[in-house]
Image: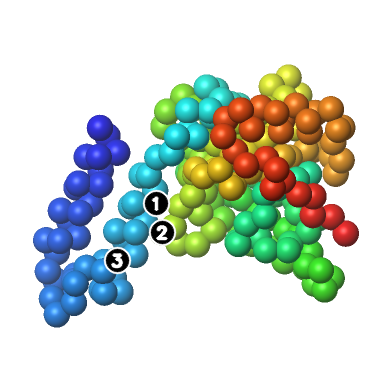
Amino acid sequence: MLKFNCITLLLFFVFNCTNFQDESKSIFENKKTFPLLLGAITYYSDSQFSKYALETIDLSKYAGSWYEIERIPNSFQGELANVRATYSARSDGNITVYNEGTFPSGSSSNIAGVAIPSSLPKAILKVSFFPVFFSDYYVIGLDTTNYSHAMVGGPVPEILWILSRESTLSDSIISTYKTSAKAMGYNTSLLKSYKN
């Protein structure tokens, strides 16, 4: 209900601010209002996979660096290899996300973004590397004792990562995560290691 109300209020605001919107264009053509609308939709969207997010997470323990062990190929990472993500707390309560890796050519890549913790008591983050656009990030598996390895899913079956504090992870733990993710509905047959 809260999500519906927030979207309704934003749509009301966008459609009624005639000084902000170019009246000669539809909301979908307007360069100022359309990004706000799309951002609201991506921020407040929900997925069948959100129910698998852990009920609680200690973000102070989750902070730090994580190595990507395997991922389902995605368009935003492409062939990026040797990926490492570092999470650090911000003064506003959100989290800075810093991702780095290397391309097959050997050149390096890095990008910084923000993660906004869910207001619900679940391990859900809204992550954005580009202004306005957010994506769901569900911590669906975790070594809750030492926070030494984790599995993260997205809102669709083709977004999934297995992470570790070290650059390697035992086959047994990887296998356990894959079995769990497959039962949730993720397409684990597509998981792949990107290391060179």
Q: Are marks 1 and 3 in contact (CB under 8 Å)?
A: no
Badge 3 is on which residue? 34
Instruction: State whether residue 176 is above or below residue 18.
Output: above
Which amino acid, mark 1? Thr
Q: CA distance from mark 2 to mark 1?
A: 8 Å
SS label for mark 1: helix
Residue at 26% x, 74% y is 29
Badge 2 is on which residue? 132
Please name whichever residue, 91 or 94, is drawn nearer the observer in this view of the structure.
94
Q: CA distance from mark 3 to mark 2?
A: 11 Å
Badge 1 is on which residue? 42
Q: CA distance from mark 1 to mark 3?
A: 12 Å
SS label for mark 3: helix
In the picture, measured across the screen, residue 50 lies left or right of residue 20, that is: right
Q: Which mark is residue 18?
A: none
SS label for mark 2: loop
Which amino acid, mark 2? Val
Can you tell which of label 3 and label 2 is closer to the viewer? 3
Residue 101 seen anywhere in this rendered image of the structure:
yes
Sort mark 3 into few (<14), some (14-19) or many (20+) by Cα contacts within 10 Å. Answer: some
